[in-house]
Image (cartoon, grey):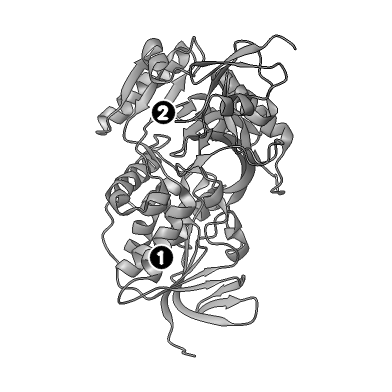
């Protein structure tokens, strides 16, 4: 069993196994809203394979990162929309 | 159906044609609008929608200021999807030489009653933190605005076609083959009788007015994903003026605009002689490099779409508004180059002033088409 790594999701410390996608870490953190559409509707992962762009979040200050295509790294700072 | 002639036929339903039809209907004229392709699908769809006062010449200043006042009057009526926003412009000065230009522009505008503000290096960095460090300052024009031109054109057109007592007629999908004294011949052989016909077809206008000195000047645009508050003003490098003035070589300039959605609209490029509407990756690359020179973080953002359009350029950078020389039934409302979104409303007023013999609020002379014929005669 590899050592867990720690990421921040909206400021909360979350421990996950190496190889965990950011989208999964967000769900583990109990968040359901990943981002808001241009008209303010809530959005979250749909395709899970990088095609639909619905799961975008801010990772280490980088906007519009596809959380389903981004692996968690130690100390990563993940921000969803509110 | 009926042989009664329209008072006015307007060819071209871009923002200039749309503004002209709205004004003509407002003044009680019977009007038909003829659009061969898509409403607001030409230069209107490739304009940034920057409502800007400019100081290139007295004629340009008078028309842009007049038009900006008209947009401000119209603003409360504009639907939400027109995204009208008085965000202001900052003309960005890279060095001390450009700051000297900033000061002379300030003097020009203040002498004419336009509010402006000089920003030093620190003011500029505070106003727009994503600009690179080390820029000299800028000139803030708080009265400038942005809007979304295709929706603004549709709004103006619908004002006319939905008019309570004298709705404008609209014909879409059939190219015009000829403007005649009796009206407009369409390529399918049909004929629309009109006392006056207005050519408002932008870069296509020489096709219907042979010999007209209007050249297509290609431009590229890039729009990004949403990055709210990344910038707050329309930002343009002062070097833009050099780019806009170059009459032969291809040129690019840093010109970026915040949209209400949080997207960034990035320009601008200018090319003469380019006829294909395809995106030219070489000049697009130059344009992006130029933008990143002023705003390095742009390189981290996602672009979602690039496209092109053709400005209608005249030799003296002023539009053509009024009858062709010595011709009282063939009018022009074209040649607006990169300022057609701003000057559409002023153009409509000046055009209708001439049609109904109304006194114009600014002098007409700089925009009369006859001036180009006169220049040719001198040449």
Discs 1 and 2 carry the same chain letter: yes
Please report contact status of discs 1 and 2: CB closer than 8 Å, yes or no.
Answer: no
Task: List x then y, in percent, for residue B351.
Answer: 38, 60
Judge whether B188 appears above or below B163 on screen.
Answer: below
Q: Residue at x 30, y 52 (%)?
A: B74
Q: Would you place residue B76 above or below residue B246 in this image?
A: below
SS type, badge 2: loop
Question: What percent of the width, then of the height, locates residue B290?
Answer: 61, 24
Q: Residues within 10 Å of mark 1 (few under 14, many from 20)?
A: some
Closest to the observer, B13 or A4: A4
Pinpoint the chain carrying mark 1.
B
Residue found at the far right of this picture:
A1
Residue B194 lies left or right of residue B377; in this view the side is left
How far is mark 1 from mark 2, CA to CA? 31 Å
Q: Position of residue B167 (x, y in %)?
A: 37, 74
Q: Secondary structure at mark 1?
A: helix
Q: Quadrant of residue B328?
A: bottom left
Residue B269 lies in quadrant: top right
Residue that numbered label 1 is attached to: B158
At horizontal 46% and vertical 61% (from top left) the residue drawn is B17
Tell me which label, 1 or 2, sits earlier in the chain.
1
The numbered mark 2 sits on a residue in which chain? B
Quadrant hosting residue A4 = top right
Give above or below for B182 relative to B11: below
Q: Nearer the viewer, residue B32 or B216?
A: B32
The structure residue drawn at horizontal position 30% and vertical position 54%, both measured from the top left corner, is B77
For label 2, the crowd category at 10 Å Cα-Cα, with few meaning under 14, some 14 to 19 and many 20 or more, is: some
**Viewer-nearest residue: A24 or B201:** A24
Q: Is residue B229 left or right of residue A79?
A: left
Is residue B19 among what the camera can see?
Answer: no
Q: On residue B232, which mark appears? A: 2
Q: Residue at x 52, y 70 (%)?
A: B34
């Amino acid at each position: 069993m590899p050592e867990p790594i720690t990421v921040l999701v909206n400021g909360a410390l979350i421990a996950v196994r190496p190889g965990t996608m950011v989208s999964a870490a967000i769900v583990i953190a109990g968040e359901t809203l990943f981002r808001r559409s241009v008209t303010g509707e809530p959005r979250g992962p749909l395709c899970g394979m990088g095609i639909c762009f619905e799961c975008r979040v801010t990772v280490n200050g980088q906007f519009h990162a596809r959380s389903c295509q981004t692996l968690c790294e130690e100390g990563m700072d993940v921000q969803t929309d509110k | 159906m009926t042989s009664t002639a329209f008072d006015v036929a307007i060819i071209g339903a871009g923002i200039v044609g749309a503004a002209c039809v709205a004004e003509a209907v407002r003044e009680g004229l019977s009007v038909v609008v003829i659009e061969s392709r898509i409403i607001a699908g030409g230069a209107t769809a490739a304009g940034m929608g920057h409502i800007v006062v400019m100081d290139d010449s007295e004629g340009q200043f008078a028309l842009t200021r007049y038009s900006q006042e008209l947009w401000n009057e119209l603003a409360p009526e504009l639907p939400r999807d027109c995204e009208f926003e008085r965000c202001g412009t900052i003309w960005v000065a890279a060095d001390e030489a450009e700051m000297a230009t900033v000061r002379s522009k300030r003097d020009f505008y203040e002498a004419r009653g336009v509010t402006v503000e000089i920003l030093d290096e620190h003011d500029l960095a505070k106003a727009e933190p994503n600009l690179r460090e080390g820029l000299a300052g800028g000139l803030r024009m708080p009265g400038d605005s942005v809007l979304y031109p295709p929706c603004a054109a549709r709004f103006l057109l619908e004002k006319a076609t939905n008019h309570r007592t004298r709705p404008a007629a609209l014909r879409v999908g059939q190219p015009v083959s000829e403007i005649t004294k009796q009206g407009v011949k369409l390529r399918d052989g049909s004929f629309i009788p009109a006392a006056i016909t207005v050519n408002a077809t932008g870069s296509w206008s020489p096709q219907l007015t042979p010999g007209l000195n209007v050249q297509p000047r290609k431009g590229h645009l890039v729009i990004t994903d949403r990055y709210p508050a990344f910038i707050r003003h329309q930002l343009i490098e002062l070097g833009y003026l050099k780019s806009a003035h170059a009459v032969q070589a291809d040129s690019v300039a840093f010109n970026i605009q915040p949209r209400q959605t949080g997207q960034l609209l990035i320009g601008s490029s200018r090319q003469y002689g380019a006829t294909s509407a395809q995106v030219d990756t070489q000049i697009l690359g130059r344009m992006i490099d130029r933008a990143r020179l002023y705003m390095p973080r742009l390189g981290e953002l996602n672009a979602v779409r690039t496209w092109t359009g053709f400005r209608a350029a005249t030799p003296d950078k002023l539009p053509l508004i009024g009858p062709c020389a010595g011709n009282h039934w063939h009018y022009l409302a074209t040649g607006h180059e990169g300022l057609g979104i701003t000057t559409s409303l002023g153009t409509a007023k000046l055009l209708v002033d001439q049609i109904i013999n109304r006194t114009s609020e600014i002098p007409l002379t700089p925009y009369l088409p006859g001036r180009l014929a006169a220049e040719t005669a001198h040449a």
